[in-house]
Amino acid sequence: MNNLASQNLAEFISNEGTCSTSMLTLYPGYQYFEINIRGFRGAIAYVDTQSVWVGAGDPVLSHPGILEEFISEFFEEAKKNRKVAYILPASKAISDLARKRDLLSFQIGSEPWFKLGGIHPNLAQARQLLKKGATVKAFDPEKLEAREHIEIEEITRGWLKSRKMPALGFLNRLEPWIGLEFKRYFHVIYNGLQVGYLAAVPIKSKRAWYLVDLIRAPNAPVGTTELLVVEAMRQLELEGAKEVSLGMSPFVRFSNTEDSVYPYLYKVMDFSLNRMGFIYNFKLLFEYKKKFGPSNWEPLYFVCSEKRVNPLGLFRLMRVVMPHGFMSILRAVVANSFSQIDSQVLAKRFLTHKILLRSMPSSFLEFVMRSKATLTLAVVNVLFYSVTSGDDGHLRAKLASKHAYQWTRLIEHGFSLESIKLLVIPSVLHWDLSHLFTNLIFLSVFVGLLELLAGTEVVGIAFLSGVILSNPLTSALIIPIVGLFSNETLIHFKQSQDVGSSLGIFSCMGVLAYFFRHTKAALSILVLGVLAVAYLQQDLLALNHLIAIAIGFMFIQYFLPKDAS
Amino acid sequence: MIAVVFSEKQHTRSCLKGLLNRIGFQRVFITDSIDEADYFFSRERDKIRLIIFEESPRHGLDAPLSRLIIQKDYLRLTTVLHVSNGTRNFFRKIVGGDALSRIDYSLDKPFGIRQLIEGLKEGRKRRSRLRSKLCILGSMPHKPIVEAMYTHEASIHWKKILFAENLNELKKNLEEFNFRAGAIAVEPALWSEDLQSFLKSFKKTRQGSLTPLLLLGRKATETYGFRDYADLFMDPKEWGWAEILKVTSKRMTHQEEMVEEIQQSKALIKENKIRSAQTKLVRCLGDDENRLEMIELLGQVCELQGRPNEAIAHYRKVLTLNPCNPSPYLRLNHLMGEKDREVLIEQGKLYCPSHPQLNALDTHE
């Protein structure tokens, strides 16, 4: 095997390569397996990984008759090096050979080919752009003026920036300026500026071209790429080209025969095509290529030197095809998913139109800056819990007896600073870890959302109002009523203790209910929830959450009425 | 009334549209494109009463839209409100305006209809505060007027009085100070057909509709040429300059919102919601007690509520400010006793000589 494509090898690949991707194997990063079989030369580029050799497309052969032997030799060589060999994308011929030997091979996509013969794709967008005065010309990157160079660089930068997912590798690398010596370039000029360009690689043996790099500026007019493709085809045909390829479309155009070979595998690929567009949108790519009306679609395959694919080998293959790694793809997927959540749509569906609320933050930093109260409350609660809980995770009995809210203790102090302390301090205490955890979740979701929609001040006032007023009001309301029915219940109620930040949280939830489109429904859910909890806990004091909701609701109704009167 | 809402956020645009419809803006144009806004400004020009825009974090207060508004002369009288995504304190109501960004008032989210109405009111006030030049056409001595301007607290709105002795000078003043001219006062002795023609056409413009025209005289012979378009008729010898300056400043300051309030009050009376109409009228008269259209409507409300004496008092007050308004005469004709009616109708015929209904009234009915 050779490590570098020597001049001789490069010429061989250039002259004898039959795949659209043959010339792309002259990019750096490939190794080459070359042998001589019965006087005929054969070579294949491959990527060497820890456990796999990934062959880049069909081998280049000086005579097609040596294909089967070449493949055998390649697989043998890989085996000698304790590697499994894969070839992708492979032609049907190689796939048939592999299946003949009972090796694993399945279709992974199709490649559209255009037979040039005076008839060219007739696309409305391309025609319209032509009418508006756009032109397509061939250019030599080495002969561009400085201004044109800058434009091209800007276009490439803009294109890369607009990509939502990390770039693919292997034969999908975007390297427009490698291979200047054999590539042809075309650009679209509109209103005096370049708005897109493409690079084409030759397939000399077939007098064909592969339009490999199709780049447009983010603000390019509609029809730019269509015009580029159509005009490039026309100009290449004038120069003697017979065929043009737009490159493989993954996971498409499987025949029924193929489906029956590995039915589950093709179901997975079909699912990926139709449902996983948020990762790489191969379906859109396919639709795009399809609209040019290819003459035929050639199936392309994955071929393995063994009967089964080893999961580790598959992993290595993925690393070759996706060189940025799975984590970068996962990050991009998560980020794209969030960016696709249209906060405007959510706002329209769930929030009232009678109050103009704040918009969702556009960045993580803005999110943090606008969640000051929520984050502070969360930190304070956690800190207090860590200091006030015992080894068993429960609130220390001494602290509970001294600081938990209790009606009898409140009455002792009357209207004084001690009373305020008695009302505020319990809000940072929690019975146990599960109590704290539940409150933290509610805090993050509801108080956090309220703070984003209405601001820190609203949250601060609602929270404090709930914390200070809920318990005394609840007690003041319930005691006279309970006193009429049962003295024992009354005594028990007066001695009930309460801790936790839930009163402030529920007050904020009352404010949030006001901002919802269906306020009554939201309030009903909250009220029913509180009643259910009070019933299950057999604790009348739990009804303080109802008062907290009412406090929040009335506070915001006063400051932000939905009606003018 | 047309309002323009400019924001990149669709929810903001649709919310504001709903709120503005509720406070009486029949047409609300919403857009997120500067080019569209520019086109709409050019097309509707004088009809745009309000522009609300939301800052983009990219631009801060130096938004492209506010620069566009500054370039348009015909938008000088339009109130511009700015909506921010809560960069300021929730309870800071008055944020004031920003001359550089052409913002009359800034609203922080979250806000509802009440805050919007208040913001609109404050924004209009600010816009009207800029219209602090009083144009006087006449040959009277300047000193008492200037003294009244500087010494009386009620005249605090007027910063400068521009005197003119003829129509050309008046035109020059109006051209020079453009939208900053807040009111025009005219001495009856300087009446001419040219002046009449000029003032008539001026009152038909947007600026004219917001600029009170005061005739400095009340005699029937003096008011004849001005009765169709003058808003107030106040003789300085009867009222005093301090009072005149105060009345004109209040009229100018609240002109725009009062036009809307008057329409709404009329609608309430028509729908037989008399108490609501009364509440509204009383509230508005708290801002401008000499708003004669409101006083007249209040008179109607009193009539409908069976309080003729109060109605008479209101109609009489209207006539002290504008004796050329035929409507109070007609209403008083039904309310007053025979003896008083006689005098009244005579007066009405004097001030409104070509009014057919007044002329048809027989003093001995």
Image (spheres, coloured by chain):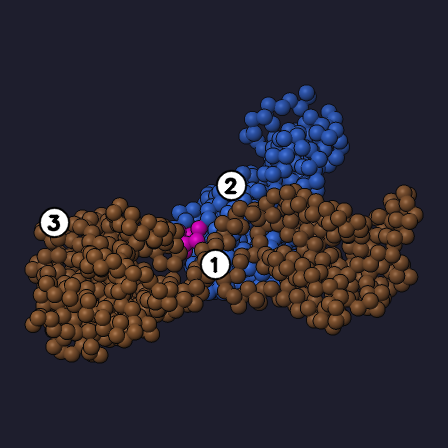
Chain colours: A brown, B blue
> Is residue A162 part of the magenta span, yes or no?
no
- Per the model, the C-alpha gap separating discs 3 and 2 is 57 Å
Q: State the image coordinates of residue B35 (x, y, percent, origin top left).
A: 38, 54
Residue A35: x and y, percent?
14, 74
- In this orientation, does residue A270 appear? no
Judge from the rendering whether residue A239 lies leftward or rightward of residue A189; answer left or right: left
Asked if badge 3 and badge 1 are on a common chain, one would say yes
**Residue at (35, 64) in percent of width and height:** A310
Mark nearest the camera among 3 and 2 is 3
Residue at point 52%, 50% (across, down): A346
Q: Amino acid at mark 3?
A: Ile
Type of the residue with mark 2: Gln
Q: Residue at x 74, y 46 (%)?
A: A531
Mark 2 lies on residue: B26
Nearer to the camera, A171 or A50: A50
Proximity of marks 3 and 1: CB atoms separated by less than 8 Å: no
Q: Amino acid at mark 1?
A: Phe
The reply to whether dot 3 and dot 2 touch (C-beta < 8 Å) is no
Front disc: 1 or 2 = 1
Marked residue chain, label 3: A
Mark closest to the chain's N terminus, 3 or 1: 3
Chain letter behind tag 2: B
To which residue does mark 1 refer? Answer: A338
Q: Pointer 3: what residue?
A: A119
B361 relative position to B43: left or right: right
Examine the rendered structure and indicate whether residue A516 appears above or below residue A372. Answer: above
* Residue B34 lies in the magenta-colored region: yes
- What label sits on residue A293 in the rendered view? none
Q: Residues within 10 Å of mark 3 (few under 14, many from 20)?
A: few
Q: Quadrant of residue A495?
A: bottom right
Which element carries disc 2, helix, strand or loop? Answer: loop
The stretch of residues the image draws in magenta is B31-37
